[in-house]
Image (cartoon, helix red, strand yellow):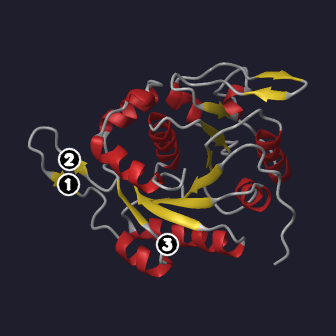
Amino acid sequence: MTLPPKSDKKQIKKIYAVGSGKGGVGKSSVTSLLAVSAARMGKKVGILDADITGPSIPTFFGLSTFPFGNAEGIEPPKTSLGIKVISMNLLLDDPAKPVVWRGPLLGNAVTQFFTDVQWNDLDVLFIDLPPGTADAVLTVMQTIPLDGFLLVTSPQEIASLVVRKAAKMAEMLSVPLVGVVENMSAFVCPDCGKRVELFGKSHSPALMDDLGASFWGSLPLDPSLAEMADGGKIEAYENKEVFDILAQGLQGRI
């Protein structure tokens, strides 16, 4: 397969796409937590929200600032930890408005988010991909100089099936698979401490065998995370198990 030339990497040291191929596995929350983890490690971090029609990153960080633009490009707003964020929801006068665009426009928006934004000297840029394996996802993998692709899955077998498609797409486009994170693996009762597998027995071990990928770990289903993300306070989230897994996965990669 002959691929088009990729954009210049600018001054960004590492660029990782985070996706799953499947919706509903919590990849946007995983992307956000990865960014928070990296920022707490003292890194300069950015998030490019490539989910043009269903953006959620600004909500998680409580961002509503319209990006400032000048002759040099677009200056993305920063979170309280200094994470730079660009997202379609920051460009709408009403975040509830739908973005009803066809494929080429979606791809162009993603390209401009990378080329026209002043990311400057970031240590790492995380790109939150939309579900599926077309349009915006294809644009990211074909045109942005990715250092790797992190897959997010959940315990169900159907999730593993769809995630395999995303992994195969990355392989076809010569994007290295840096690992897999299983999200919403279990719920831990706050009263008794019992761990309950709400989605049944995990199918991730079979997925790992098939992909030959590094398994970063299993993140719990935590209602407090959902509450803090909905309230725009994901940077204040504290869960040692979660951040230990993500920090270990990022070790040596940023």
Depth check: give the residue in front, 56 or 171.
Answer: 171
Q: Position of residue 23 (x, y in %)?
A: 53, 54
Pointer 1 or 3: first along the chain = 3
Pointer 3 or 2: first along the chain = 3
Determine the secondary structure under disc 2: strand
Residues at marks 1 and 2 touching, judged by CB atoms closer than 8 Å: yes
Q: Amino acid at mark 3?
A: Leu
Residue 50, quarter of the rendered image: top right
The label number, if any, that marks residue 196 in the structure image: 1
Residue placed furthest toward the left: 192
Residue beneath label 2, please? 188
Label 3 CA crowd tier, 10 Å (few <14, some 14–19, many 20+): some
151 left or right of 138 in image: left
**Residue in view at x 65 percent, y 41 percent:** 49
Residue 228, quarter of the rendered image: top left
Is residue 130 among the parts visible in the rendering? no
Whole-number angstrom distance, CA of label 1 to CA of label 2:
6 Å
Residues at marks 3 and 2 touching, judged by CB atoms closer than 8 Å: no
Whole-number angstrom distance, CA of label 3 to CA of label 2:
26 Å
Height in image: 8 above or below 233? below
Residue beneath label 3, please? 161
37 left or right of 170 in image: left
Q: Position of residue 105 (x, y in %)?
A: 84, 46
